[in-house]
Amino acid sequence: MLHPIFLILISLILMYFGASWLVKGSSSLALKAGISPLIAGITVVAFGNASPELAASVYAALSGHGNIAIGNVIGSSFFNILIVLGISALIAQLKIRIQLIKIDIPVLIAATIGFMLCFADRQISRFEGGILLFGLILYMIIKIILARREKSVEILAEVKNSVPDQKIKWFWAIGIIIAGVGLLVAGSELLVKGAVAMAGALGVGETIIGLTIIAAATSIPLLTFSIVASIRKEYNLAIGNVVGASIFNILGTIGISSVIHPLSAIAISSIDLYIMVGVSLLLLQLLRTKYILKRDDGIFMIGVYLFYLYYLWPK
């Protein structure tokens, strides 16, 4: 049992630094290419925060562990919304802007329902993956257009501050990106191998491991990012990146993984999918009241996640 735990812990370190280096290198290249910090914050940072999920799901798909690949995305959606936002709300009451309710969360709900329809036969083909990727591209275009129209100085400052201003030469930036990708690949391999070994040691299915351990492990960079944003009182950034990462995981991670290798995950239950939609609807309902995610809400969300773990784990 110690061996798989060791593999998972090492993978956490590798994927954390891999995601961090990928964001730093990509941000530097983007700024050198003349891309505004605002656009870089919407695209590069969002991609970097979701890169561990992408790396783990792609490796799982190529290794024939479709249940882990899909379970990772579904479980990350639970963890990101309930735990990452829950902990962030405990640190500070999160005030949000109305665009999150009018656009981003409805897109998250629509993306979840779209994924459920594609996954009705418990498979995601290359064509279906392409549809999901098209949805992500469309969403990013809309975000960029809206960002260029943004007038709030506070929000613009938050997004720009999320982009690491690395004043390094372009070849060092490329080197950092390559190193980051390498760490993500190595970390995803160790994570999947450790999770599969842990599933065997505990006598549980790979799906449960994907929904819980792998999902939580790949969400650590986003958790760290959101905690720091909450401490700095950058509330829009704390919530927006969680919702954005969840959208990227559903449309991008599953889309890219299935285009590379069609996914099959017969062990994913309909209940998990319904809960996935329910969690997004819960977030929308909590935020619609006063545009604030309160500490009581954070406690409730963490409690919901713990209850889900209790339901999921074999008795």
Image: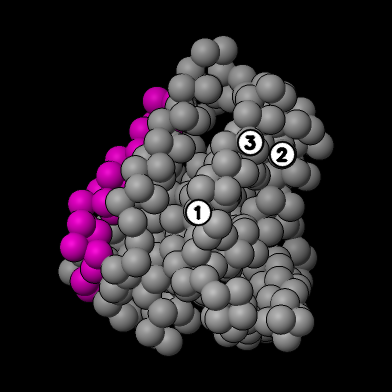
The amino acid marked with disc number 1 is Leu
Task: Look at mark 3 in the image and give the residue it sits on.
Answer: 303
The amino acid marked with disc number 3 is Gly
Task: State the residue at coordinates (54%, 67%).
Answer: 209
Q: Residue furthest top?
A: 290
Left or right placement of residue 261 versus residue 37 in this view: left
Query: Which region is colored magenta?
Result: 101-126
The amino acid marked with disc number 2 is Ile
> Which quarter of the figure has residue 154?
top right
Task: Look at mark 1 in the image and give the residue it sits on.
Answer: 312
Q: x, y percentage for residue 175?
A: 67, 83
Left or right placement of residue 25 versus residue 248 in this view: right
Task: Tell me which secondary structure the magenta stretch mostly adopts.
Answer: helix
Measured Cα–Cα span from mark 2 to mark 1: 21 Å
Q: x, y percentage for residue 56?
A: 52, 74
Label annotation for residue 139: none
Task: State the residue at coordinates (46%, 37%).
Answer: 279
Measured Cα–Cα span from mark 3 to mark 1: 14 Å
Task: Look at mark 2 in the image and give the residue it sits on.
Answer: 87
Please identify, in this view, whether the residue under mark 3 or under mark 1 is nearer the observer. 1
Upstream in sequence: badge 3 or badge 2: 2
Q: Count of labels shown?
A: 3
Crowding at mark 2 (Cα within 10 Å: few <14, some 14-19, many 20+): many
* Contact? badges 3 and 2 (CB < 8 Å): no
